[in-house]
Image: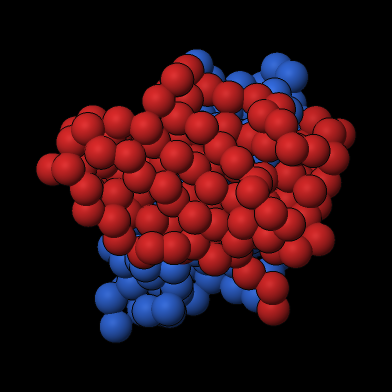
Chain colours: A red, B blue
Amino acid sequence: EPEVTQTPSHQVTQMGQEVILRCVPISNHLYFYWYRQILGQKVEFLVSFYNNEISEKSEIFDDQFSVERPDGSNFTLKIRSTKLEDSAMYFCASSDQIGGGGAKNIQYFGAGTRLSVL
Amino acid sequence: ILNVEQSPQSLHVQEGDSTNFTCSFPSSNFYALHWYRWETAKSPEALFVMTLNGDEKKKGRISATLNTKEGYSYLYIKGSQPEDSATYLCAFPTGANNLFFGTGTRLTVIP
């Protein structure tokens, strides 16, 4: 069964360093997403991406964050200069529905990358 | 900020017991409600997408109901098994299909 894969499963970095989290979405999907969960808190939406551009982003997704689909398969989240509060589990998801208010928009999630900023 | 709440936060049940938990969400501008099951160290897995008031969906021993007028959904598990132990998340689609998640209910089934 097709699945979303994320690498690495755990990333440790020093504060101020750049990190790139990688995702391979399901191959025929068109919409891509990043979410994160800070320990003990809700899963929060960061950004959605369609047709090689950001379609929506949350307040969390500030200038320190960027996303890219550098080739036909990878979808990456870059954090330019990590802060302690960026420590979280980051989830990538993909879906094959376009618009429609999300009524049937099942999103398929990866297992996440745990980012630890020291 | 949407108010999507789940209760209880955590739940311990004995193997074989049936259980249920609640997701409450804004009843205005309703499009759909999603239920996900998330086992530790695995990907959150979609269980149901509920779209119509009165919807009832079933997958094996797990079922869900939806009341859009009063803004709640129940998830039921019949005859809980240890493999049902997971966090159950409900999510409310907003904007361009991004999901606004509830706090989750962590279920532990004791053998």
Give the residue displayed 33% in from the left and 72% down from the top: B109
On screen, residue A74 above or below A69: below
Q: Is residue B66 left or right of residue B22?
A: right
On screen, residue B95 above or below A93: above
Q: Is residue A50 left or right of residue B6?
A: right
Q: Position of residue B84 (x, y in %)?
A: 45, 72
Question: Which of the image's four quarters has the C terminus of chain A?
Answer: top left
Quarter of the figure with residue B95: top right
Quarter of the figure with residue A74: bottom right
Give the residue displayed 70% in from the left and 17% down from the top: B28
Give the residue displayed 28% in from the left and 34% down from the top: A82
Give the residue displayed 60% in from the left and 73% down from the top: B61
Query: In this view of the protein, can residue B81 be seen by the observer?
Result: yes
Quarter of the figure with residue A47: top right
Query: In this view of the protein, can residue B19 be seen by the observer?
Result: no
Q: Position of residue B3 (x, y in %)?
A: 49, 22
